[in-house]
């Protein structure tokens, strides 16, 4: 999996936040998919981006994209942004990541559909988080999961630490 820095886009958001839109490319057997995430930080901390720890949100579903930040003071994200860069991951198959729907599966045999869909499980989402951590040169990643995202977070935390 590679992180496409050329696909990074910086956007000013309401509430004095800045978002960078990022995509990673995942090469599968016979297919390539894109995994989208946004880095959200307080605009006032943009110069300290290299020093801030990162928190990744893994949302429920499966099948839901990450929430979009509307304000730097909204609920948990407002608090998290005081101490972290927040990574909002559109898990595989959702949001701005490569979607899975009838059109993407059309023309595939049932066996090929099953093989393709196997790349959208929790273990693949965990791999995406770890790849993003490595590509962003982060020593560690704080994980916050809700519902199915909590299952993904526990799956991530049960893996042996990177060497």
Image (cartoon, rainbow, N blue to C red):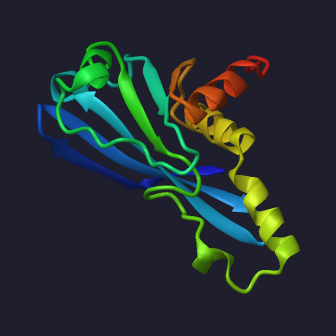
**Quarter assignment of residue 132:** top right
Quadrant of residue 98 in the image? bottom right
Q: Residue at x 31, y 34 (%)?
A: 40
Name which residue lies at 26% across and 47% down: 10
118 sits to left or right of 101:
right
User: What residue is rendered at 69% in x and 19% in y?
Assistant: 157
- Residue 79, percent from left and from top: 27, 15
> Could you say which is closer to the camera, residue 25 or residue 97?
97
Residue 48 appears in the picture as rendered: no
- The residue lying furthest to the right in this view is 111
In the rendered structure, the answer to whether residue 67 lies left or right of residue 58 reads: left
Q: Residue furthest bottom?
A: 107
Q: Nearer the viewer, residue 162 or 69?
A: 69
Q: Camera-side residue: 60 or 91?
A: 60
63 up-or-down from 29: above or below: above
Residue appearing at x 43%, y 58% in the figure? 96
Q: Is residue 45 left or right of residue 142?
A: left
- Measured as percent of width and height from the top left, residue 103 is found at 59, 80
Q: Name the residue furthest left.
A: 15
Residue 76 x/y as whole percent: 31, 20
Image label count: 0
Quadrant where the C terminus sits is top right
Q: Is residue 163 visible?
A: yes
Would residue 78 be found to the left or right of residue 66 on screen? left
Q: Position of residue 67 (x, y in %)?
A: 35, 41
């Amino acid at each position: 999996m590679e992180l496409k820095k050329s696909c990074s886009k910086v956007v000013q958001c309401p509430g004095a936040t800045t978002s960078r839109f990022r995509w990673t490319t995942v090469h599968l057997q016979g297919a390539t998919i894109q995994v989208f995430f946004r880095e959200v930080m307080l605009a006032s901390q943009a110069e300290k981006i290299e020093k801030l720890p990162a928190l990744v949100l893994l949302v429920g579903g499966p099948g839901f994209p990450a929430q979009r930040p509307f304000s730097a003071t909204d609920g948990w994200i407002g608090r998290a942004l005081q101490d972290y860069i927040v990574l909002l991951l559109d898990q595989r198959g959702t949001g701005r990541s490569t979607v899975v729907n009838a059109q993407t599966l059309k023309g595939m045999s049932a066996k090929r559909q099953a093989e393709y869909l196997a790349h959208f499980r929790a273990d693949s989402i965990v791999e995406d988080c770890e790849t993003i951590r490595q590509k962003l040169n982060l020593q560690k990643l704080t994980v916050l999961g809700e519902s199915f995202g909590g299952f993904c977070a526990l799956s991530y935390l049960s893996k042996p630490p990177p060497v």
